[in-house]
Amino acid sequence: MALGVAGIPIAFILANSSQAVNLYLHLHSVYPLLSHSGSTILLIDFVTLVFLLHSLLIIFSTYVLTFGIPGWVAHGLALIRFMIISGIFAYNQSLSVKPILRVIFQIPIIIAFYNLIDKREIDRILKFGFTLFCLHSAANVFIFTARGGAYRVFGAPNVYYNEIGMLFAPVGIAFFLWRGPGVNLSFTALGQYWVIFGLLATQSRAPLITVVAVGILWLLYPFEKEDRF
């Protein structure tokens, strides 16, 4: 509770900083902030609140007339409706509350990014995220090898390593296939190897199968596009 109260002025200071967006992106793969008596406060939750507060300050002071809502929000609302219906008929209804709240929490984040992030910044964000995840993967592989493969290694992202891996593994393949300016082919290929071996270090089969399946689809897409045009 004391840390939460102390974090309020820190949150307002950071929210008024131009680095609020970068802070959100840089710390997205660091999992815990504080664990006490079985309750965990996630660092990314605190940073997300700072980012949303920063977004509100910017949007209401600058972009009120140009404020927009992306089309994805309609899909997000549909997903929430289906999750609520599923939760009503669930065996343990209380377990469905947290996932629904998490999806609801994602909608203002998507809206904030849609209004604050320039399209030219998306490429830079993806490159940064892929590079950061490659470093995480390399560290995980080193730890896994040093321990003789006896332990599952997830690294700083903890349980979210697999989710981030399922996102950035296809990103790495896309960079490799459709590399643009500023993309180093050798680094991308090497990074992709680290990502795959990093997923192997977690010993989680479903995420690895997902990455392989999506990778195959990405590899088939250029041939389909070439035949079509």
Image: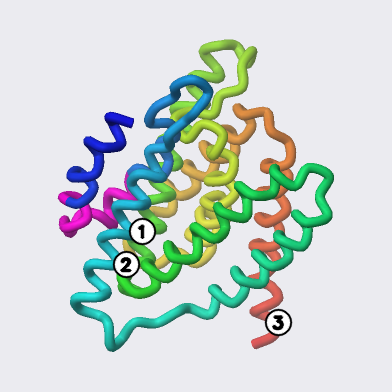
Amino acid carrying mark 3 in the image? Asp
Residue 169 included in the magenta stretch of the image: no
Name the mark on residue 227: 3
Among the two numbered marks 2 and 3 on one chain, the one whose residue lies closer to the N terminus: 2
CB-based contact (under 8 Å), mark 1 and mark 2: yes
Residue at figure coordinates x 49%, y 65% from the top left: 107
**Colour setting:** rainbow
Residue drawn where x is 53% and y is 23% of the image: 38
How far apart marks 1 and 2 lie (CA) works out to 6 Å
Looking at the rendered image, the quarter that the N terminus falls into is top left
Residue 15: x and y in percent read 22, 55
Q: Is residue 142 above or below residue 124?
A: above
Q: The residue under label 1 is which amino acid type?
A: Ile
Q: Earlier in the sequence, mark 3 or mark 1?
A: 1
* Range of residues picked out in magenta: 13-26
Crowding at dot 3, Cα within 10 Å, few <14 / some 14-19 / many 20+, comes out as few
Is 86 placed above or below 59 here?
Answer: above
Q: From the viewer's perspective, is residue 81 above or below residue 28?
A: below
Q: Which residue is mark 2?
A: 121
Measure the C-alpha gap from mark 2 to mark 3.
31 Å
